[in-house]
Amino acid sequence: MARKLDLVDLQILRILEDEGRISTEILAARTGVDQTQCEERIFKLELEGHIGGYTIIRNYPDAEARPLSAVLRILQTAGRTGHDLQRSMESIPEITTAEAVVKDRSILVRLQVPDLDRLEKITAFFQAQSSVVSFEVATTQPLFSHRPVPQIIGH
């Protein structure tokens, strides 16, 4: 069972979402814990999967420099757990999220790549997997993005 995040953990996550390169010294001061405690909390959040990596997300005024966004829908052979496919995804840094669709046991993979050539290499990798029955890819264009504010109960 996953541990319930407390107010400080939620504050750390919110701040890191907005200011990913903030120093632990400043983060500790803003959350009211000492630097060692802050570093320990970040480490726990990483281990528990709340922090899955560090990346830069920015606006690209030059359309040529903007990464290409895509969504892949991968349908696996019936009876496969998907663990081997999930492990192979960890080696692809362009993947931003991967989600299992409960209804049909497919996997939706969201990624950002520098160009179509890299997208084709990633799709070829997935198509070559023995557990993949069918595969769809669609490039996307962002409309908007937001993150929900977590509900804090008991504080």
Image: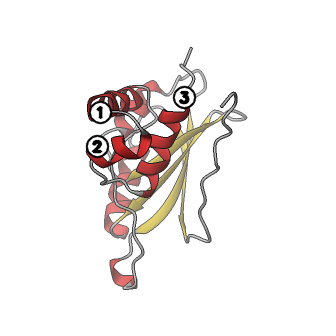
**Residue that sits furthest to the right in the current view:** 103
Q: Distance of mark 1 from mark 3, alpha carbons?
A: 15 Å
Q: Where is residue 78 in the image (x, y as percent from the top left)?
A: 61, 26
Q: Label 1 sits on what residue type?
A: Glu
Callout 1: helix, strand or loop? helix
- Please provide percent x and percent y for residue 29: 35, 44
Please identify the quadrant where the N terminus is shown: top right
Whether residue 64 is visible, yes or no, is yes
Identify the amino acid type marked 3: Asp
Quadrant of image for the C terminus: top right
Q: Is residue 58 above or below residue 37?
A: below
In the image: residue 130, left or right of residue 92? right
Which residue matches tag 3?
A: 6
The residue labelled by disc 1 is 39
Residue at 33% x, 78% y: name it.
65
The residue at 53%/23% (across/down) is 80
Q: Which of 46 and 115 is in front in this view?
A: 46
Sequence-wise, which precedes: disc 2 or disc 3?
3
Look at label 2 and name its amino acid.
Thr
1 and 2 marks in contact (CB < 8 Å): yes
In the picture of the structure, the residue carrying the numbered disc 2 is 24
Residue at 54% from the left image edge and 28% from the top image edge = 5
Percent across and percent down for residue 128 are 38, 42
Residue 3: which numbered mark, if any? none
In contact (CB < 8 Å): disc 1 and disc 3: no
The answer to whether residue 132 is visible is no
Query: Which one is earlier in the sequence, the residue at label 1 or at label 2?
Result: 2
